[in-house]
Amino acid sequence: MKKAYVFIALGVALLLVGSYIGLFVAPAEEYMGQVQRIMYVHVPTAWNWMLAVLFAFGCAIAFLFTANTKWDARLEAGLEVATLFAFLLCCQGSIWAKPTWGVWWDWDPRLTSVAVLLFAFLGILALRGFVDDPQRRAVWSAVATIIASVDLPIVYYSVKWWNSLHQQQSTPQTVASQFHLPLRINAFGVLFLMIGFIMLRTRIANYRLAREMAMPPIGGEQAGELA
Amino acid sequence: MLTAALRKELLLQWRTRSQLMAVFVFGATTLLLFSFGIGPNAEMLRTFSSGFLWLGLLLSSTLTLSESFHAEMENRALEGLLLLPSDPRALYYGKAIANWLQLTLLGCALVPVMVVLYDAGTTELLKLLAIILLGTAGLSAPGTLYAAMTAQVRAKQTLLPLLLFPLIVPALLASVKATSLTILGDPMHQSRSWIALLAAFDLIYWSLCGLLYGRVVEE
């Protein structure tokens, strides 16, 4: 339990340091200017979003094989964090795209894949909200997560074919070394923050599962009082 | 067992054929409404015709898909079917194939409406049929699986599109692109690669959803 807060504190501290370096120490990019600095949060969020999706996918498979409800709690945490990060990615990307490309949105394969998966995961979270039986909810959301995650590469490549206008992905070779340090610090900052979030969220999901699995109180008066 | 399940589904669909007729009218109405969204610009309507056709088909498909599990939910018929000494996959594929055929029929019926409303005809009818077959296969495989889930919960009318629409983005994209190239001309022979993408999508989801269906309906 305490570990989750340690991770979150560590993540916030790293993000503060990394963002300070990114905002005040690193030089502004030649063509994009100050706007480019959003990359120091955007790219780490993107990397960790992919990790969160992979985590959710792994939890879904683990649940289907083991039928252990712990994996369902982790899946719920992974789904929510992946949804949050996808939403953040869309917001950050739009803020960056408006001054750079002149539009809020572009049909870039990465952008579109994130948006598609955001809606797919929102759908799965809605499904979870509508199923009362915990066993069914766990199986169905695991199945839906697997189906949606398998879709991700297909969406990516189909949109890439559909709209071949996009910019190349950056690699350490194409990015100057002054930009590396804040990017890496922030990547670990977001990673620790994500681990902390997932741990906290898993705990809440576990509590809720335990309450749902517990036998209902005997006698109508008690139940009436609770309601 | 598969043939028995398929026969049951087709018989059921034949006996409720008035429902398919109603869905067709719904699809044709959406095609009519899309043109009001654009305005009476003949050139533009022709350009977007394939997109409208597939969107109309997609919207109608949620009606037929959610309806396909309606009968199973009455008197807990699904549980009875699962008690049969057979693989639940046969039930899934029977239903998915029946839905596929129904959606193909619907797609073929909507094509003349598109031709009349948007002046978007083509002579390559066999190719168009192949695209409709592959595209509706992409809709029905995950659609049948999700319908099996959502039929058993509250708010099923909302949940099915919510789950299905993001998922079938690649299939929709490829179908629209291939249909559009067939109608508007394909000088670079690009439609073949879109059809290949559709076939790959179908292959992945027809096998994956069949594998997972047993887990979805188990008690």
Image: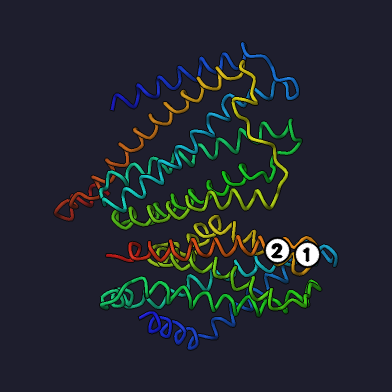
Identify which residue, A72 or B30, lies in the foreground.
A72
Identify which residue, B11 or B72, lies in the foreground.
B11
Label located before the other in sequence (2 or 1): 1
Identify which residue, A15 or A63, lies in the foreground.
A63
- Label 2 chain ID: B
Residue ranking furthest to the top: A25
Answer few, some or many: residues within 10 Å of disc 1's Cα (few below 14, many 20 plus, some between 14 and 19).
few
Quadrant in which the N terminus of chain A appears: top left
Distance between the Cα atoms at labels 2 and 1? 7 Å
For mark 1, what is the residue? B186
Answer few, some or many: residues within 10 Å of disc 2's Cα (few below 14, many 20 plus, some between 14 and 19).
many
For mark 2, what is the residue? B191
Mark 1: which secondary structure?
Answer: loop
Quarter of the image where one finds residue A88: top right
Identify which residue, B6 or B165, lies in the foreground.
B6
In the rendered structure, which amino acid carries the disc numbered 2?
Answer: Ser
In the drawing, does residue B65 fall left or right of residue A142? right
Quarter of the image where one finds residue B124: bottom right
In the rendered structure, which amino acid carries the disc numbered 1?
Answer: Asp
Could you confirm whether marks 2 and 1 are on the same chain?
Answer: yes
In the drawing, does residue B138 fall left or right of residue B1? right
Q: How many marks?
A: 2
User: What's the residue at 34%, 55% (across, down)?
Assistant: A137
